[in-house]
Image (cartoon, grey):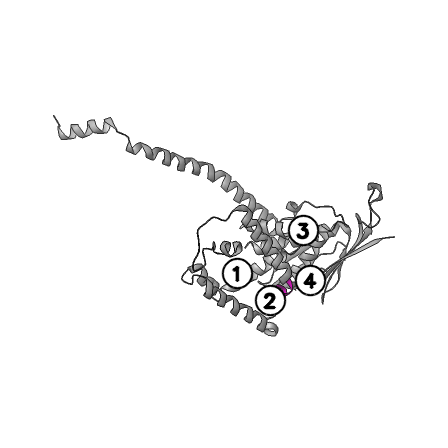
Amino acid sequence: MTIWKLRNNNPLRKSYVTNNIKHNEFNALIRITVEMSKYLYPYIREILKSKEDIKENSVIWNDFNERFIELIKERFNIDSMRVKKLLNRDENDEIIIKSLLILSFCISNQGYQKLRNFLYDF
Amino acid sequence: MQNKFSFHQSSVSLEIIGLPDYSNNENKDQISIISQWKLTIVDKPLIEGKIEHLGPIMDAFYIYSNLLIKNEIPKYESKLIDIKADNLHIHNIVLKSSKPNVKPLVLKIGNSLLSDTINCFDQLNESPKVRIKKTDITTNIPKKLRFRLNKKVKFFNFFIPPFMAICSLILFSSYFIYFYSPLENIEKKEQINPK
């Protein structure tokens, strides 16, 4: 329930709340993200690989991109310019690749600290 | 008898061979004096080198991966290794030999192999069994980037204090607008009664 509520702090969502995320909640979200990345690393890796040789592995990339766009359309405010950028197949490659790369670099035991540093640097 | 540890991540493995530092009362199964290392990437030539090369190569990969995700120009250059992006998905690595007349080794790796390599280096860094001497990362940042970072910091240091001062001055002085100004009233009266 708490995670579900925290999710609604994202201003890109269709309906969101403007509560400030507390420091410990922010850290908890990072920990969950890192744990999920560890678990999903083989999939993340395959998606990244599929884009390296798009002729051979286009199915994986296309499936992922389609699902990504579906989710964004379903849950995010599609009138927002930033969301439109995520939906544009010509422009969203870079955002997706970099997000996946960040997740794939943070699967070690120190991944939590690494992801935290990446996010603070942005 | 030398110790050997291997770190694996999908298509990449890193092998470290060396001895414990007995003078430091270390356990038999530790490595502090690395004599050999090998980085194996599937379908790519074997990378191996002297101990003094491992630290700079790891630093190069870490700095490059940071540049890549921080929207900086993904390019790292040093005497030992160059890494630059061919495009968003492929990275070009040039490993230069310290021996004369040996051609540099050129590798092209994708994002998947790059993340495998970074994860192998992470495993090595986090391993309690292997101790590696940390090199000074900042010295390996390309000059151009270092200059840009310094310039950025200097610019902010130069710009922010006067900017804050002006803002606080404007905010503070804006309160005086509401105060009564006797001089202004005298001038107004003079304008109404020019005699």
Q: Amino acid at mark 4?
A: Val
Q: Quadrant of residue B136?
A: top right
Indicate which disc residue B59 carries.
3
**Callout 4 secondary element:** strand
Span shown in magenta: A41-50
Residue pointed to by mark 4: B106
Task: State the separation of the CA atoms marked 3 and 2.
Answer: 26 Å
> Which residue is painted at 60% across and 53% down in the image?
A31
Task: State the separation of the CA atoms marked 3 and 1.
Answer: 25 Å
Q: Is residue A62 above or below residue B48?
A: below
Residue found at the very far front of the displayed protein: A1
Lower position in the chain sequence, tag 1 or tag 2 = 2
Give the main secondary structure of the magenta stretch. Answer: helix
**Callout 1 secondary element:** helix
> Which residue is painted at 52% across and 44% down in the image?
B152
Residue pointed to by mark 1: A95
The residue carrying pointer 1 sits among few (fewer than 14), some (14 to 19) or many (20 or more) residues within 10 Å by Cα, namely few
The residue carrying pointer 3 sits among few (fewer than 14), some (14 to 19) or many (20 or more) residues within 10 Å by Cα, namely some
Q: Amino acid at mark 3?
A: Asp
Residue pointed to by mark 2: A47
Q: Nearer the viewer, residue A85 or A73?
A: A73
Q: Nearer the viewer, mark 3 or mark 2?
A: 2
Chain assignment, label 3: B
Is B102 one of the magenta-colored residues? no
Q: Is residue B86 above or below residue B151?
A: below
